[in-house]
Image (cartoon, rainbow, N blue to C red):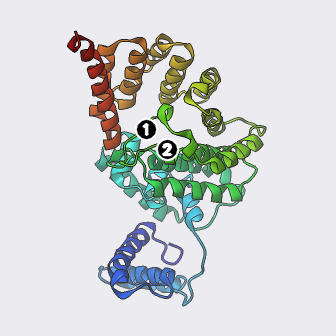
Amino acid sequence: MRRYGDFGQAEDAVQEALLAAATRWPRDGLPEEPRAWLIQTASRRLIDQWRSERSRRDREELASTREPPPQDVPDRDDTLTVLFMCCHPALTPASAIALTLRAVGGLTTAEIASAFLVDEATMAQRISRAKRRIEQSGIPLALPTSEERPARLRIVLHVLYLIFNEGYTSSAGRELQRTELADEAIRMARMTHRVLPDDGEITGLLALMLLIDARRPARTTADGELVPLSDQDRTLWNRAQIEEGRALLDGAMGKPPLGEYRIQAAIAAVHDRAARADDTDWPQILALYGLLEQLTDNPVVTLNRAVAAGMAEGPSAGKALLDSIDERLAGHYRLDAVRAHLLEMAGDTEGALEHYRAAAGRTTSVPEQRYLALKAAQLRLGETEPSASG
């Protein structure tokens, strides 16, 4: 991008170079300088593409004025630079998030479309328009100045949050978790925190990721089946990550203004402090979700608050909160799953069965489908066993 100035074509050329490496390196062996090999291969692909086009003379003249490919490729990581570039104010927030998830986070267009609740074709057009906008704006590949950073930071944090969420609980497919995405989100959050260590929300987001990711070893069985938080073996949790996350959160809580990531991290910390599920301080979690709801007006926050209300005050309190977001989350599998959970707590087996089955039919995650179907089967078995035994 720095040499040739075209973000879209540079990304395509890098993908082709990676494909060539995946084909050739297993056969020919790893080159002495893998990074240089990739960049030089991508440069050749890009130049070959330009030469094949009708306007090759103009493009080659432009390319000749750019920085020539050096013999020694600098050993530096441009991930954070690309991240801030993709979150430039010239783009709408929705376009910036989508582009960054694609170019930096490595998500497919289908995965991004699922996160935004739009169809894949719409998301592909949005990403293409964002690439064109970057090309037309002449945005350089460089970290923003201290004056420019605040305008981009909110989008950057939201992007990292979405990448982590997709890695921690994949929206589709046969695997519950995509470890490489969660790890990459944590890595980029650490990089951002090193640049702006005094920002409370960056610190809060990193703390949130660590506190939640610490549960990863206990979230699935050996066969990849989902294990809910209440049933997890908490001795498997990564205590070092929990301690690091809590230390970061403690250091960030006093920095105003209080933001959504620090509140979410505080909720995660309450869960992580409980040695057993029965020890969870649900009233405190309910209060924190109430504060987060006031700050964000997000129906998913209300959904989580309903769970906390059900645990702290009883299932009827949780169901009352769900009624307020029926329209805003209509058709979302998590609405059915939470309603099923609350109905099960209230002893309404038929209602819980109906909503567990509806949730299982709506989620595109295979582990979640299996877990929700299993919950329904267990309820049905419990319902039929008494009559079968007389």
Q: CA distance from mark 1 to mark 2?
A: 7 Å
Tag 1 near tag 2, CB within 8 Å: yes
14 over 233 or under it: above or below: below
**Pointer 1 residue:** 227
Residue sitting at 49 percent across and 50 percent down?
163
68 over 133 or under it: above or below: below
Element under label 1?
Answer: loop
Residue 215: x and y in percent read 54, 44
**Residue type indicated by callout 1:** Val
Residue 184: x and y in percent read 52, 58
Left or right of 49, for residue 90:
right
Residue sitting at 53 percent across and 66 percent down?
138
Q: Please indicate, yes or no, whether residue 372 appears anywhere in the rendered image.
A: yes
Q: Residue furthest bottom?
A: 71
Of residues 32 and 367, the one nearer the viewer is: 367
**Residue type indicated by callout 2:** Ala
Q: Earlier in the sequence, mark 1 or mark 2?
A: 2
Q: Please indicate, yes or no, whether residue 118 appears anywhere in the rendered image.
A: no
336 over 50 or under it: above or below: above
Of residues 179 and 71, the one nearer the viewer is: 179
Give the class, few, some or many, for how many residues have Cα within 10 Å of label 1's Cα (few <14, many ≥20): some
**Pointer 2 residue:** 218
Q: Residue furthest front?
A: 389
Residue sitting at 39 percent across and 49 percent down?
222
Residue 142: x and y in percent read 61, 67
Of residues 344 and 50, the one nearer the viewer is: 344
